[in-house]
Amino acid sequence: MLNTGDILETIKMIQEENLDIRTITMGISLLDCIDSDADRACGKVYEKMTRKAENLVRTGEEIEKQYGIPIINKRISVTPIAMVSAASGEPIKYARTLQRVAESTGVNYIGGYSALVHKGFSAGDKELIESIPEALAETTNVCSSVNIGSTKAGINMDAVAIMGRIIKEASEKTRDDHCFGAAKIVVFCNAPEDNPFMAGAFHGVGEYDCEINVGVSGPGVVRAALAKHPDANISEIADVIKKTAFKITRMGQLVGTEASRRLGVPFGIVDLSLAPTPAVGDSVAHILEEIGLESCGAHGTTACLALLNDAVKKGGVMASSHVGGLSGAFIPVSEDAGMIDAVNCGSLSLEKLEAMTAVCSVGLDMIAVPGDTSAETISAIIADEAAIGMVNSKTTAVRIIPAIGMKEGETLEFGGLFGSGPVMSLSKFSSAKFISRGGRIPAPLQSLKN
């Protein structure tokens, strides 16, 4: 039986508390498009993707109208292009093809200009990685990711060294566009194969040929729920978050199931991640402050974030039988109004953010750093974050933007969902010798679980 109270509560969440479906992402396998001729392969890629996704945007818009649920982005993820281009070379042609698909289908972003090199480089990997700066400078809607480590394999330090340079080059090639090339690159440890969020989405080889994955949002809803319990103890706060996450996830399950039915493809997963925006009242940092911190970054921040992340997962898994992706709380700096404020007032540093990533959903996300930051320093930041993921058997990632021509304390403006990034300070001491050694950090003992 329909509960009028539940309906009115959901309407309030949407209208007043920034509740939305952040993305419906169609994952498409391109393994059957592999060809030794790059032009033929790209033709197959274009044909399959436009055929599978021709109704994706329209279907999302129809669901929005029918249920009154905002669906902010409609996206596509594909098989890591390094695998597809290995037989033919010329990966840049595939990037151009993905851009044409985005323009033809009307999707916001396509993820999967990617390589998986956590243990070493195979055919096609290095060529694709070296092409990333050019590919992202030439395209608007294409996103890239590289997995450089895992708990099972350790950390590929040769890949880590390369990615510091690639990120710097991507930023320099797009310096006239707010260095946005670097904002479309994610470097992972333990990358999930069903992540619907950009820039790190790609379609894993163990997935369906085509599927729908959904990413929900809702930091504003969680904060509003906590505001109704100003005197609750920590156990009660965890319970409030769990119940709220359940409601948010049920909405994601509804949208995913309906999109799957209408598009005639399997429903993959709901990603529970609380994805913030620069909008007032839609901030993960503000949730932490509602729990009792004067400002995000104060002592106790990591504990509050661990509480939030765990409660979100516990509530979400009760609402959907198919939970995956990243599932937790995102802590991007530029995309979260509370994080931006915390950096600007001096309460949140990069070192504190790194500590928080040990318990959050992903890692260092949308971090602007001075434009003269060396490639080796960027690589060292990636290595630190990968080590946290490797040792803790969790996904960690780095999306860092060297703000070319800017210094600490200045602000890099992106606009839209990406907000603005305060340029953060870094250690002045060098990690160059460490990065230059190359090789591989061995997998930790906890990887031996068989």
Image (cartoon, helix red, strand yellow):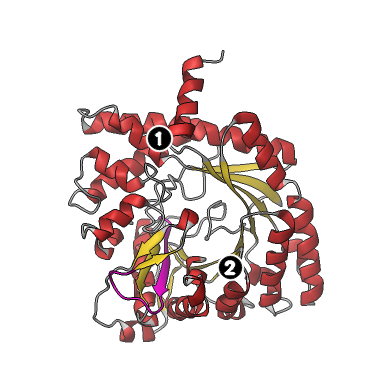
The image position of residue 443, as x and y in percent, is 40, 67
Quadrant of image for the N terminus: top right
Is 58 rendered above or below residue 153? above
Between disc 1 and disc 2, the foreground one is 1
Res 286 → quadrant? top left
C-beta proximity under 8 Å, tags 1 and 2: no
Q: For residue 70, say whether it is visible.
A: yes
Is 183 rendered above or below residue 66? below
Is 327 rendered above or below residue 187? above
* Real-space CA distance between mark 1 and mark 2, rounded to the nearest whole angstrom: 34 Å
The image position of residue 137, as x and y in percent, is 58, 75
Judging depth in this view, the residue of 79 and 138 nearest the camera is: 138
In the picture of the structure, the residue carrying the numbered disc 1 is 221
What span is colored magenta in the figure?
A: 394-410
- Identify the residue at image location x=50%, y=27%: 11
Around disc 1, counting alpha carbons within 10 Å, would you say few (fewer than 14), some (14 to 19), or many (20 or more)?
many
Disc 1 marks a residue whose amino acid type is: Val
Judging depth in this view, the residue of 133 and 83 nearest the camera is: 133
Is 3 rendered above or below residue 206? above
- Identify the residue at image location x=53%, y=32%: 251
In the picture of the structure, the residue carrying the numbered disc 2 is 114
SS category of the residue bearing label 1: helix
